[in-house]
Amino acid sequence: MKILSFILLMMACVTGLSAQHHHEKDSAPGARAINSQHSLYHLDAGWADHRGDSLALSDFRGEPVIAVMFYGNCTQVCPILIQDAWRLYSMLDDSERASVNVLAITFDTENDTPERLRAYAEREQLDIPGWHFMTSRPASVRNLAMMLGVQYSEKSDGHFAHSNLITVLDKQGRVAIRVEGLNQPMDEAAGTIRSIINNGEL
């Protein structure tokens, strides 16, 4: 009888762990469909980066852009997303990297000030030319997320549920390719960037 009770208890624990695992997977909303013909550079909001510089998205016109949305207090998923962006960036050679900008845009406009974003960039050893950790007004961040197809929502504990997405923009600010998920292959995205640099088109 004791053995049977122990087996039932173990089965319940395994079931509970499995349900928790699936819940964690389900907590990341998928990316929305987008119109890739729309340029993000029509968004005229002002932005600030981790260096304290005032920027507009249109400042990056004429060069390909790697865009990723994250927030600084995220300790599990976002560091992987940022490293995925670095992995894509590092697949390019020196001359190609010189023609590419990386925009890491925070969801957490309340806490991720330019000063905190600078500390984050320094901690991740990504305070380097061409990388911009950026923030703006909540409405501006929401509009950009919609254009990228990124879904996010703040949870009661202050963390965010969000799509895991890396996007490459062409020279006109249109979405050229998106890579959804963590630790995904970046070969196709790197090839897309090279085509944009070399040919000005896909």
Image (cartoon, grey):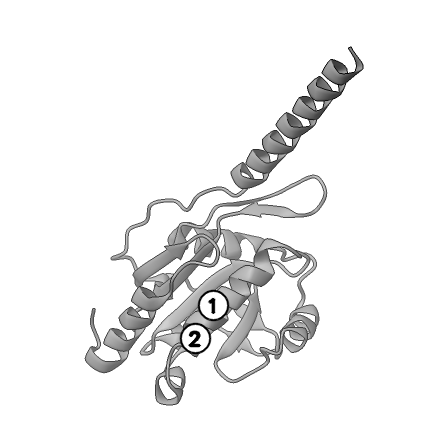
Where residue 66 appears, x then y in whole percent?
41, 69
Q: Of helix, strand and loop, which one carries label 1? A: helix
**Residue at image point 40% right, 83% down:** 97
Determine whether 78 is above or below 30 in the image. Answer: below
The amino acid sitting under disc 2 is Tyr
Q: Which quadrant of the rendered structure holds the N terminus?
A: top right
Q: Of helix, strand and loop, which one carries label 2? A: helix
Q: Which residue is mark 1?
A: 85
Residue 154 sits in which quadrant?
A: top right
User: 142 left or right of 11?
Assistant: left
Q: Which mark is residue 141?
A: none
Determine whether 181 is above or below 40 in the image. Answer: above
Where residue 17 appears, x then y in whole percent?
65, 33
Where residue 72 appears, x then y in whole percent?
65, 61
Q: Which quadrant of the rendered structure holds the C terminus?
A: bottom left
**Residue at image point 37% right, 65% down:** 186
Neighbourhood count class around disc 1 (C-alpha, 10 Å): few under 14, some 14–19, many 20 upward: many
Q: Which residue is mark 2?
A: 89
Q: Are marks 1 and 2 in contact (CB under 8 Å)?
A: yes
**Residue at image point 34% right, 78% down:** 63
The amino acid sitting under disc 1 is Ala
Residue reaching furthest bottom? 95
Residue 79 sits in which quadrant?
A: bottom right
User: 138 left or right of 96?
Assistant: right
Where residue 59 appears, x then y in whole percent?
41, 76
Determine whether 69 is above or below 61 in the image. Answer: above
Residue reaching furthest top? 1
